[in-house]
Image: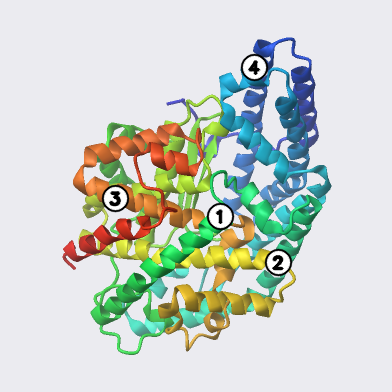
Amino acid sequence: MKEIKKFEEWPFKVPSIEKTKEKILEFTEEFKNAKDANEAIKIINRLNKFNDKFQNEITHVEVLYTLDTRNKKYEKAMNTLNEGLPLIQSAATLFIKAYLESEFLPDLEKKYGTFLTKMYKYQLKAFDDRIIEELIEENKLTMEYDNVTAGIRVEYKGNIYNLPQMGKFLQDNDRKTRQEASLCYYKALDEVKDKLEDIYDKLVKVRDKMAKKLGYKNYVELGYIRMNRYDYNKDDVAKYREQINEVVTPIAAKLLKDQFKRTGIKNPEYYDMSLTFKDGNPTPLGTTSEKIEYAKKMYDELSKETSDFFRFMAEHHLMDLEAKEGKVSGGYMTYFPVYETPFIFSNFNNTAGDVDVLTHEFGHSFQAHMSKGIKVPEYRSPTMESCEIHSMSMEFFTHPYMFYFFDDPDKYKYQHLADSISFLPYGVTVDHFQEWVYENPSATKEERNKKWHDLELKYTPYKVECYKENKYLMDGHRWLLQSHIFSSPFYYIDYTLAQVVAFEFFNLDRKNHELAWKRYVALCKLGGKYPFRTLVLKSHLKDPFEDGVVKQTIKPLLKELKSYKI
């Protein structure tokens, strides 16, 4: 592994947009004037190295900003990027056009593969200088969403908490505590709902304007291209959503019914859905630093590769895990190409979710680590639904080691697996909602909320039955906290597709761990050399889009749930 300094010692630099743009244009002219394919390849390699350096700098700015949105220096740097990155994209597009029009394209395809050509063609379909103004506005609005949600303060029992910090109270074993905490939580959300709806309304309209400027019927078409849906379309997704509704919705309903029976709650309310066991949800042991030590032991046992790499990340402080003031909600992994290392961001709140996010984001990180040797930057990481296979599968590969984190590991494993199954109907709800929104861009806020509520009735009716005492949820505002809807439209069906594939790895792991792990590592090493469905098939797994695959995959999981001693 590359020797680097600890994260807090990295130099902070805001890249010059103008100089970066000029440099890319210089590379493009050099490329156009290349005398032969070998010279063209050398220029591409130099451009890739330059782009890696630029990407390293902007990623550092983005990470620091999400760690503390209150910091004016980071906010200023982010504003510079929000306004400048579309201009960089414009310059990069000129290079892509030159690549596709090059007389040496056959030679370049021998060197870099035909999939890169397809990627570049998609990028041209998604961008034109005519939409630079809209792209800048889109960046500003998504940053505004992050600012608003990171700034939400919940007053509870004389103390002030941010949203992630409220998680432990919302799952408390005491029903009165859950009720009181939930009232405070949703009161705080209600106070910003109009602001969030206004931001989203502007985002929908600016994205619709973008799509129509580029000649598309609506943003659904453009959104699929921006998300690089190379080998499936909205019709495939619609059929897949029906598979989930038909197969998984009834199972998720039964799991929730069993949960209420187990907890002894006769008339369940919305704040009861978070309690899995009568004596309380599994709570991870130890402080954050102790959890990292447990994870070291776990990854030592899982494999040599995971052992070395996790210890490297811990030693170089490449994880910021605790919820804190001014920090953006959620969790992510991002990658620094110059340092050849990922970075993990999360918001620990002393719930089982701490372990979920640690293993999930390490799965992303492990793939980035295994693919770092890929020379073509575009091939280092696959499309998002493939990326989520790595993360969600890692959650299950670590199941045998949950005794490090929990006094009763079977309870954690049951809750994690049950929640993963029940997630699928929610995931397709988000996707269906987004499709409808962008097919109806002029819909009012009230119409959007009603549509969300109607889709919940379709995919998760068992949840809606518990909403009756919560006006915020009954009025269809739950989607406002799903950040992907704002910042990454159509990035959500990805989680459900990956979840089904991760279940396939889980089922195989129970039968033959060595084979499952070997295939998983091989998948990680492939990076993004192929589109989603090809990567799945190359991993000797079943395609989730195919009829019957969801049902075949879920069936063994129900038997697994029954095996846990809870």
Q: In this view, does 197 lie to the left or right of 353?
A: right
Q: Check the image and tell me how it is coloured.
A: rainbow
The answer to whether the residue labelled 2 contacts the one labelled 4, judged by CB atoms less than 8 Å apart, is: no
The answer to whether the residue labelled 2 contacts the one labelled 1, judged by CB atoms less than 8 Å apart, is: no
**Crowd around label 3: few <14 · some 14–19 · many ≥20 (10 Å):** many
State which mark lies toward you, 2 or 4. Answer: 4
Pointer 4 residue: 41
Pointer 1 residue: 491
Q: In this view, does 216 lie to the left or right of 292?
A: right
- Identify which amino acid the numbered label 3 is placed on: Phe
* Secondary element at image label 3: helix
**Crowd around label 4: few <14 · some 14–19 · many ≥20 (10 Å):** some
Tell which of 145 and 8 is nearer to you.
145
- Identify which amino acid the numbered label 1 is placed on: Tyr
Pointer 3 residue: 506
* Secondary element at image label 1: loop
C-alpha gap between disc 4 and disc 1: 33 Å
**Between discs 2 and 4, the one toward the N terminus:** 4
Identify the residue at horizontal 42%, vertical 53% (top origin): 546
Q: Is residue 140 placed above or below 49 in the rendered structure?
A: below
Pointer 2 residue: 199
Residue placed furthest toward the front: 547
Q: Is residue 117 left or right of residue 273?
A: right
